[in-house]
């Protein structure tokens, strides 16, 4: 359930947008102006802000940055408010919502900020057993560690556990620990008091307090700095947290779910993850197998995504042709369910006729079928050693090309690329920031519209 803050008058089209979001399951909070909206974000947080361009969107975005509040702001206005919309986007608003609002566009925004709301689509026997185990432990209060490769659906499973738990009426709050720098991550988790740092002009609740009575998902916790790991451990043990700049602990009632693509037991052995925190988090361990190990789920998921994106784009629903199904079943799916979803989204847009044929299945990393002579040629030693092509180039240029090629190979997935490169997600993010500042094109995050927060 996404938490949406609406800033502006609800008497006209903005009120319609709020009602559409509420009908889609969002929890709506309202504020009359940008200053009141900022106070609401400090106190309760939100997953998305819809702000009328008649209010000072630029000031709001600047204040959120100064107070380390990570929340996407979408400017809203009529088409004749184009100048105000441009100013808002330049100031840092993630997108512009034309009024009167489009229901499908609002639904896409809610899905981007709150994650996939559907029940997991499961047919493979291994996944069915995993789902049964997840439902068995859902009603307990124990922490759960969800493991699996990037794109396997760890947050989907976490949301399913929350929905089946005794805390289902409470909030579900998710935070990607790899998506934020350390200073911002600490403030996002624990909140801060007025004057805790430059820009902290008022007290603000963090994710722990926002998830009170519900569930907090710490996604990609394996990327967390050891200092913050110690604070997370204390929060779990003592059921209390310390706001930045605070003088007294704050009691919290939150169930912790954690997710990671790393093998935390190995990270513990290498001294990169606290052993005591690992055992606190891994009371119950659930491993989601990669899609290549649960091939019985490929076609059910493909049909599910084909139906969803046909509805979302106002297109007729088309069945998958047998040849298209064969292509999907033969693919290795290195990007897992996320790659399958993006593939079907493209297929829905490219398909013609009464069915989705193989010509609409654009597999970005499909392994080519080589003839015998091609295999022989590929196996033969190259006439010129590959490293020769690097002679005369600067090290930073080679590094840049390697990073960007790896990111393209991973379909833009930052977490997977960092894993392949053997660097941290923060190092990768800093490098990409440098490249963008230098005017270099960087592959976008897969399936993520411009108003979504960056993910690993």
Image (cartoon, helix red, strand yellow):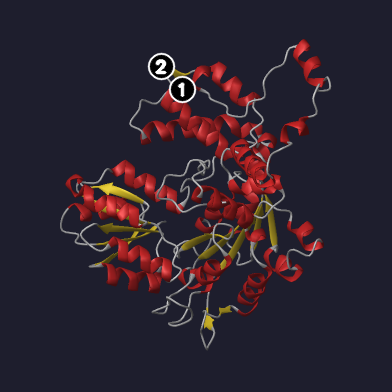
Q: Which residue is mark 2?
A: 354
Neighbour tally class for label 2: few under 14, some 14-19, many 20 plus, Cα within 10 Å: few
Q: Using the image, determine if residue 264 lies above or below residue 287.
A: below
Q: Which residue is mark 1?
A: 319
The structure residue drawn at horizontal position 38% and vertical position 44%, both measured from the top left corner, is: 108
Q: Quick check: 88 left or right of 186?
A: left
Give the left or right position of residue 73, taking residue 184 as reference: left
Quadrant of the image containing the N terminus: bottom left
User: Can residue 127 be seen from the camera position used here?
Assistant: yes
| Label 1 close to label 2 by CB (< 8 Å) | yes
Residue 105 spot, x, y in % from top left: 33, 43
- Is residue 123 at all visible to an observer of this figure? no
| Relative horizontal placement of residue 356, taking residue 423 as reference (left or right) | left
Query: Element under label 1?
Result: strand
Q: Residues within 10 Å of mark 1 (few under 14, many from 20)?
A: some
Disc marking residue 146: none
Q: For residue 61, what is the image quadrant?
A: bottom left
């Amino acid at each position: 359930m996404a938490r949406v803050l609406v800033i502006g008058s609800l008497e006209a089209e903005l009120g319609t947008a709020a009602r559409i979001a509420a009908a889609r399951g969002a929890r709506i909070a309202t504020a009359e102006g940008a200053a009141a909206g900022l106070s609401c974000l400090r106190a309760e947080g939100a997953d998305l802000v819809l702000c009328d361009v008649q209010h000072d969107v630029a000031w709001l975005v600047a204040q959120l940055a100064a107070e380390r509040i990570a929340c996407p702001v979408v400017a809203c206005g009529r088409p004749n408010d184009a100048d105000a919309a441009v100013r808002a986007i330049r100031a840092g608003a993630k997108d512009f919502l034309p009024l009167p609002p489009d229901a499908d566009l609002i639904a896409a925004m809610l899905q981007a900020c709150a994650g996939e709301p559907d029940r997991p689509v499961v047919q493979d026997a291994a996944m069915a057993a995993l789902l049964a185990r997840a439902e068995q432990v859902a009603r307990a209060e124990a922490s759960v560690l969800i493991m699996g490769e990037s794109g396997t659906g760890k947050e989907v499973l976490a949301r399913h556990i929350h929905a089946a738990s005794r805390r289902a009426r409470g909030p579900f709050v998710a935070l990607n620990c790899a998506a934020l720098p350390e200073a911002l991550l600490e403030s996002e988790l624990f909140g801060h008091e007025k004057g805790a740092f430059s820009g902290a002009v008022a007290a603000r609740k963090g994710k722990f307090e926002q998830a009170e009575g519900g569930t907090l998902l710490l996604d990609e916790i394996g990327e967390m700095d050891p200092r913050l790991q110690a604070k997370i451990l204390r929060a779990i043990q003592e059921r209390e947290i310390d706001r930045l700049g605070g003088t007294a602990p704050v009691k919290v009632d939150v169930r912790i779910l954690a997710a990671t693509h790393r093998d935390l037991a190995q990270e513990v052995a290498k001294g990169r993850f606290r052993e005591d925190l690992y055992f606190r988090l891994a009371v119950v361990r659930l491993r989601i197998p990669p899609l290549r190990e649960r091939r019985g789920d490929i076609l059910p998921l493909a049909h599910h995504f084909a139906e969803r994106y046909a509805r979302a784009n106002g297109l007729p629903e088309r069945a998958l042709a047998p040849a298209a199904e064969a292509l999907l079943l033969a693919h290795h799916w290195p990007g897992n369910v996320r790659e399958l979803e993006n593939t079907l989204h493209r297929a829905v847009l490219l398909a013609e006729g009464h069915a989705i044929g193989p010509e609409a299945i654009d597999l970005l990393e499909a392994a080519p079928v080589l003839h015998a002579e091609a295999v022989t040629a590929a196996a033969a030693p190259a006439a010129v050693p590959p490293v020769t092509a690097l002679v005369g180039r600067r090290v930073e240029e080679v590094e840049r090309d390697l990073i960007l090629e790896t990111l393209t190979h991973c379909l833009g997935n930052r977490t997977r690329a960092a894993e392949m490169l053997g660097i941290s997600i923060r190092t990768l993010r800093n490098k990409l920031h440098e490249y963008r500042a230098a005017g270099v094109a960087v592959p976008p995050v897969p399936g993520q519209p411009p108003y979504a927060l960056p993910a690993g």
